[in-house]
Amino acid sequence: ADAFAADVIYLLEQPTLTQFAGEMGISQPSASYRVNELAQKGVVEKVISPRDRRECRLRVGAEYRKKTLDAPGRVETMIKISPLLFQK
């Protein structure tokens, strides 16, 4: 579940928490809880918007990049499945 959530954040290219929750089909409090867990593990980083301090953007962290993006063939697989992730 952690890998899928991180993949969604990566594919959405720095989504807000609300965008992440919407794509995952979960409530905003659940998304916040999930993101906080991932941030503690170094999988996700929260970036505060310089324009609006209330807005938080999400991006993948060093742990995700090390284990996922550096894995042979992983990015190519994500590109192939990304249209399936975001079908409505």
Image: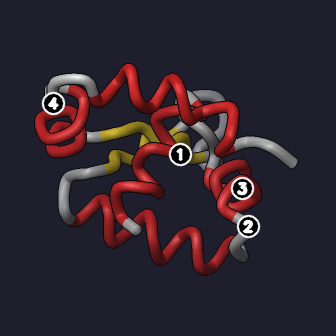
- Name which quarter of the figure residue 18 lies in: bottom right
Q: Residues within 10 Å of mark 3 (few under 14, many from 20)?
A: some
Q: Nearer the viewer, residue 57 or 60?
A: 60
Residue at the (64%, 29%) spot, across then down? 51
**Could you tell which of marks 3 and 2 lies nearer the N-terminus?**
3
Residue tagged 1: 8
Q: CA distance from mark 1 to mark 3?
A: 13 Å
**Could you tell which of marks 4 and 1 lies nearer the N-terminus?**
1
Q: Secondary structure at mark 2?
A: loop
Q: Position of residue 10 (x, y in %)?
A: 46, 35
Q: CA distance from mark 3 to mark 2?
A: 10 Å
Residue tagged 3: 18
What is the count of numbered marks? 4
Give, as a three-letter code, the residue at label 3.
Thr
Q: Residue furthest right?
A: 88
Q: How is the image coloured?
A: secondary structure
The answer to whether the residues at label 3 and label 2 have Cβ atoms under 8 Å apart is no
Q: Position of residue 38 (x, y in %)?
A: 32, 63
Residue at the (73%, 67%) spot, across then down? 25
- Name which quarter of the figure residue 60 lies in: top left
Q: Nearer the viewer, mark 4 or mark 1?
A: 4
Q: Nearer the viewer, mark 4 or mark 3?
A: 4
